[in-house]
Image: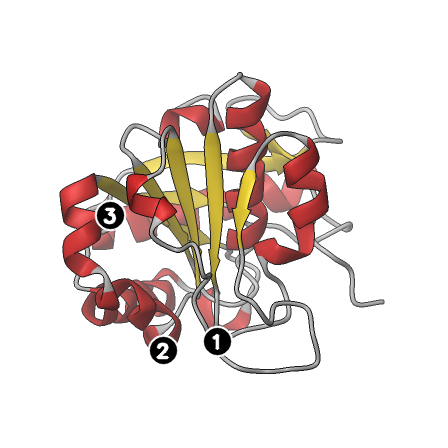
Amino acid sequence: MTSFNELATEKITIISGPYGSGKTNVAVNLAMSLAESGLECRIADLDIVNPYFRSADNKELLEKMGVTTLVPEFANTSVDIPALPQNYQLLFNGSGKSIADVGGDGDGAAVLGLSHDDYIEAGYKMYFVYNRYRYITAEPEGALEVLEEIKRASGLDFHGIINNSNLGLETDEEAILNSIPYAKKLSEISNLPLLFTTAPDWLDIENTVKIKDITKKLF
């Protein structure tokens, strides 16, 4: 694949990955890319377990671009109550394309299992976001354990891997290139295709897809 838009072949695109993988950034970049192409789309913040990095943080930016954002009622408030967006069903029956930003472990992915049949009926593709530079996924075997945990909790299958290995603002070309063999190993042991490798938009690296860093910063 050579662009984010190629991920959205079905009604719903599910983006999942462990904490620190950058899966929310991937999901938001996909929504922005679809909107920039003139496609109607929405993004649902289903990361109801981890409140720290979530697509709800980008609600204002996304809606300015024409992306409908489905966020839990208490997102970005002092009230910590796991809840689905009130207009959650638009994910399945709204016009255009839908993106689901889902927590990347068994607890977070359980939200998918609640609507398992709806995803099947609507048509979906689910992608695993991999970051070689996070402790739990430093080795492909660790990443595979998380991937399988998400599959079990959701009852849904993955359709590919996105190598989003990065070190935040310290990411350089060497870090990107060094991650690729690890991503290929994960692809091999999971029997899933490695769809593409992302690179920050300030780097020009051949055979990568540029990604904007728009997640919130804690410091």
Quarter in which the C terminus is drawn:
bottom right
What residue appears at the point 19 percent right and 52 percent down from the top-left corner? 118
- Residue at position x 29%, y 34% from top? 11
**Which residue is situated farthest in the right direction here?**
219
**Callout 1 secondary element:** loop
Instruction: Choose top left, top right, bottom left or bottom right for residue 141.
Output: bottom left
Report x, y in % for residue 182: 42, 51
- Is 60 located above or below residue 111 in the figure? above
Q: Crowding near pointer 3: few (<14 within 10 Å), some, many (20+)?
A: few
Asked whether residue 142 appears in the rendered view, the answer is yes
- Reading the image, the residue beneath label 2 is 107
Counting residues from the start of the chain, the first of labels 3 and 2 encountered is 2
Q: Which sits earlier in the primary sequence, circle 3 or circle 1?
A: 1
Q: Which mark is residue 33?
A: none
Where is 50 relative to 26, above or below? below
Figure coloring: secondary structure
**157 or 72: which is nearer to us?**
72
Do residues under tags 2 and 1 come within 8 Å of each other at their CB atoms?
yes
Q: Which residue is mark 3?
A: 188
Residue 183 drawn at (x, y percent) = 40, 48
Residue behind mark 1 = 49
**Image height check: is 152 above or below 123?**
below
Question: What is the distance, in whole Å, between disc 2 and disc 1 at their CAs?
Answer: 7 Å
Mark 3, mark 1: which one is toward the viewer?
1
In this rendering, the answer to whether 94 lies above or below 102 is above
Q: For the residue marked with disc 1, what is the amino acid?
A: Val
Q: Amino acid at mark 3?
A: Glu
Asked if the residues shown at circle 3 and circle 1 are in contact, with their CB atoms under 8 angstroms apart, the answer is no
Q: Badge 1 local density, few (<14 within 10 Å), some, or many (20+)?
A: some
Does dot 2 land on a helix, a strand or a loop?
helix
- Residue 60 image-quadrant placement: top right
Which residue is most to the top? 38
